[in-house]
Amino acid sequence: MTTPVQLSRGEKRKLTDLGASQTLSVTFDAGLPGADVSVFGLDGDRKLRNDTYFVFYNQPRSPHGEITTDAQPSSAHASFTLDLAQLPPTVTRLMFVATHDDTPFSRAGTGTWSLRSNGQELARYAYQGADFQAEKAVMVAEVYQHAGEWRVAAVGQGFNGGLDALLVSFGGEVAADAPAPPTPAPAPTAPVDLKKQARVRLDKEIQHSAPQLVSLVKQAQVSLQKKGLDEHTARMALVLDISGSMQGLYANGTVQRVVEKALALGSRFDDDGRIDVFLFGVNAQYAGEVSVRDVTGYVNRLMRTTRLEGGTQYGKAMQLLRRHYFGDAVKRKQPFEQSLPVYVMFVTDGETQGQDVAVQQLMDGSYEPLFYKFLGVGHERFQFLQRLDDLRGRLIDNADFVAVNDIDRVGDAELYDRLVQEYPEFLRSAKAHRMLPQGLR
């Protein structure tokens, strides 16, 4: 009896090296009570071109039985069968995901994903709740075709938006199959644009819960349209300086307005109406999410439980970001591939200690699809941020610096134009180096 290969996160193996045939079975335990497990049948650009290849408890079989499951609602566990030889040419990636409506995967125990062929367990991937933070969805493992060969990869990537955000990131525009053509043939069924539907729901929620964001959202949309990014999907993080010198900006409402402007932009990147928030001073910490439902008064509530700190360490915040989104903050010399980019709005009023750490983090991060928009607020010269903006030796240009003396005196149109400048060039470079799917909008 063979001993299964224990996969670590990011590890990839050819199925032929494992001795697998093209008829496989998967046993999947999310490790979190109440979770759902499912599989997406994607094309080479990681797009769900046909929603009948989203196999889960309510659709347990793909059109011709190439993928089946015995999943039940909220059971956290299921088995799947895969017949790779019968998949259509448009389905070349099978992404296994676990999602939960309410509970983050940081509360999971041990999750396991096991691959079998001919009755033998060939590979196993195990993850722990400690691998995640606030994510309510996890892309666990993938069976995919590359250079004509089928392979398996342990992914282990958390996704904050839950199942709806995954549907959008994989689907975008999901076209239903056209009906069988009688005489005369009817027109094909119109595509279902999931992202637009979700955005309409979000915009209604903004009008109800955060009306102060309405004009900001409209202006952010205009600035993105100018860059051809009106249909773009990304994850967004807001990083806030909590050093002592920021006290006045927190007290006078400036930081609250920055949060609102950031959330408005984030609502155009991802229609779950949430962005991640990180804080840094001497140390760095993940502060959870801010959403359109709780953005009003957010900073006042934050300051009741947060103390300002006597120092500024950009590098620690950058390390935390990389660990949060990519699993670690190691030195890299090869591009790191993800399905979505991360846009980071990094807000500070002063220079940093530990400049060498920040430089190294930006260098190593240039192999990852994460873009820093450094926003210097106040009257500092910000020489180091300018140095980071111009830093040589990076694989791609992954940062831009914007100085704003008084954010309330900068018009929203100008601000959002400046916030998205250089981002399209970053996306093109990240795709060229295969950090992002070529089909990403």
Image (cartoon, rainbow, N blue to C red):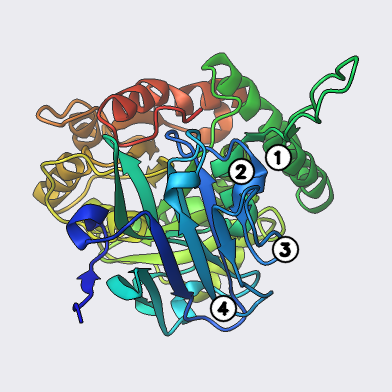
- For disc 2, the neighbor class at 10 Å (few under 14, some 14 to 19, many from 20) is many
Identify residue for label 2. 168
Q: Amino acid at mark 1?
A: Leu
Circle 1 Cα neighbour tier, 10 Å, few/some/many (<14 / 14–19 / ≥20): some
Residue of label 4: 76
Cα separation, mark 3 vs mark 4, equals: 14 Å
Q: Which mark is residue 58?
A: 3
Q: Earlier in the sequence, mark 4 or mark 2?
A: 4
Is there CB contact under 8 Å for labels 4 and 2?
Answer: no
Q: For the point 23% across and 59% down, which residue is it?
A: 316
SS of the residue under disc 2 = helix
Q: Cα distance, mark 2 to mark 1? A: 6 Å
Q: Residue at x 36, y 55 (%)?
A: 325
Secondary element at tag 4: loop
From the viewer's side, name the closer residue of 121 and 49: 121
Which residue sits at x=46%, y=73%?
A: 28
**Mark 1 and mark 2 in contact (Cβ < 8 Å)?**
yes
